[in-house]
Image: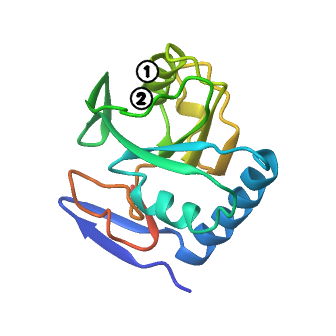
Amino acid sequence: MDPRTITIHDCDFSTYMYEEEIIARIVMLAEQIEQDYAGKNPLFLAVLNGSFMFTADLMKRINIPCEISFIRMSSYQDMQSTGHVKEVLGLTENIEGRDVLIIEDIVDTGHTVNALLHQLQEKNPSSLEIVTLLMKPECLQHQLDVKYVAKSIPNDFVVGYGLDYNGLGRNLRDIYKIVS
């Protein structure tokens, strides 16, 4: 397959990961999670909006008893992290004594996940892990132990498969990176 180029707002993007590769990586994550949580009833906590496609495809492949809930947090404006994380829609479930897995679309600076981890740890879960589709290790500004990573990527701005650029691009089946 040849990379496609698309334009969103004022930027050009080329294909970075095709849907088939994304799904193959999700299948591997699902198998690992099933092994690690066999005999347990984990709560998956999906961070909206970006993780919705990843969450849907992951959950379709998890075959152990589990629950899912959604929260919404934000720290982005345009293509830069603001560094300020605010909870928009909160957690309603009691997570005390529960095995909780946070589902993120991307971990780059780590501001959002770090803030969320601190908020959730105060609620005394039995365990707390992070599941992310993409991770930018060179961008991390927090010490984070991200156990489940579908793919580590360089510090390129990406859109598609739930990831957006100022609201556009979430609906794309593939992931695109900005053309420099």
Circle 2 residue: 112
Relative to 153, is 165 on the left or the right?
Answer: left
Determine the residue positioned at 75% across, 46% down.
Answer: 37
Helix or strand or loop: what does disc 2 sit on?
helix
Label 1, label 2: how far apart the Cα atoms are = 5 Å
Residues marked 1 and 2 touching at CB (< 8 Å): yes
Say which quadrant the N terminus sits in: bottom right
Residue type at tag 2: Thr
Q: Nearer the viewer, residue 156 or 180?
A: 156
The percent position of residue 144, horizontal first and vertical second, equals: 62, 24
Determine the residue positioned at 60% across, 71% down.
Answer: 23
Determine the residue positioned at 69% across, 66% down.
Answer: 27
Helix or strand or loop: what does disc 1 sit on?
helix
Mark 1, residues whose alpha carbon is within 10 Å: few (<14), some, or many (≥20)?
some
In the current view of this chain or complex, which residue is farthest to the left? Answer: 9
Mark 2, residues whose alpha carbon is within 10 Å: few (<14), some, or many (≥20)?
many
Quarter where residue 82 is shown: top left
Residue type at tag 1: Ala
Say which quadrant the C terminus sits in: bottom left
Circle 1 residue: 115
Q: Nearer the viewer, residue 7 or 84?
A: 84
Kindly tell me whether residue 178 is visible in this rendering: no
